[in-house]
Amino acid sequence: MINRDEVEGKVESVKGKAKQAVGNLTDDPALQDEGVQDETAGKTQEAIGTARRKVGEAVEKLGEKIKH
């Protein structure tokens, strides 16, 4: 199941892409740069969330094997 970090990371990434698009339309390099930073931070947070989820799933599987 997807976790909070994954969801929040996706949202941040989309927000960053939107800022980049608005920055491109308005010819605002500062907004474009801010969008790139937001997108990168979002992707990083999503990756951390994915890693946490996979570790948790692996621990659960190991626990199930130990029980049996």
Image: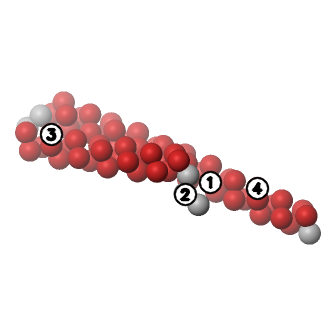
SS class, disc 3: helix
Residue at point 90% right, 62% down? 66
Please tell me whether residue 29 is drawn above or below residue 8 in the rendered image: above
- Mark 4 in CB contact with mark 3 (< 8 angstroms): no
Marks 3 and 2 close (CB-CB < 8 Å): no
Q: Which residue is mark 2?
A: 2
Q: CA distance from mark 3 to mark 1?
A: 34 Å
Residue type at mark 1: give it: Arg
CA gap, disc 1 and disc 2? 7 Å
Mark 2 Cα-neighbour bin, 10 Å: few <14, some 14–19, many ≥20: few
Q: Decide: marks 1, 2 in contact (CB < 8 A)?
A: yes
* Quarter placement of the C terminus: bottom right
Circle 2: residue type: Ile
Pointer 1 or 2: first along the chain: 2
- Eye-nearest disc, 1 or 2: 2
Q: CA distance from mark 3 to mark 2?
A: 31 Å
Residue located beneath label 1 in the image: 53
Q: Secondary structure at mark 2?
A: loop
Q: Which residue is mark 4?
A: 59
Q: CA distance from mark 4 to mark 3?
A: 44 Å
Classed neighbour count for the residue bearing mark 3: other residues with Cα under 10 Å, few (<14), some (14–19), many (≥20)? some
- Residue 18 in percent (x, y) is at 23, 46
Q: Picture quarter containing residue 58?
A: bottom right
Q: Between disc 3 and disc 2, whose residue precedes?
A: 2
Mark 1 packing: few (<14 Cα in 10 Å), some, or many (20+)? some
Q: Residue at x 44, y 46 (%)?
A: 9
Residue 62 x/y as whole percent: 81, 61
Q: Which mark is residue 9?
A: none
> Where's the N terminus, which quadrant?
bottom right
N-terminal of the pair, mark 2 or mark 4, is 2
SS class, disc 4 = helix
| Disc sitting over residue 23 in the figure | 3
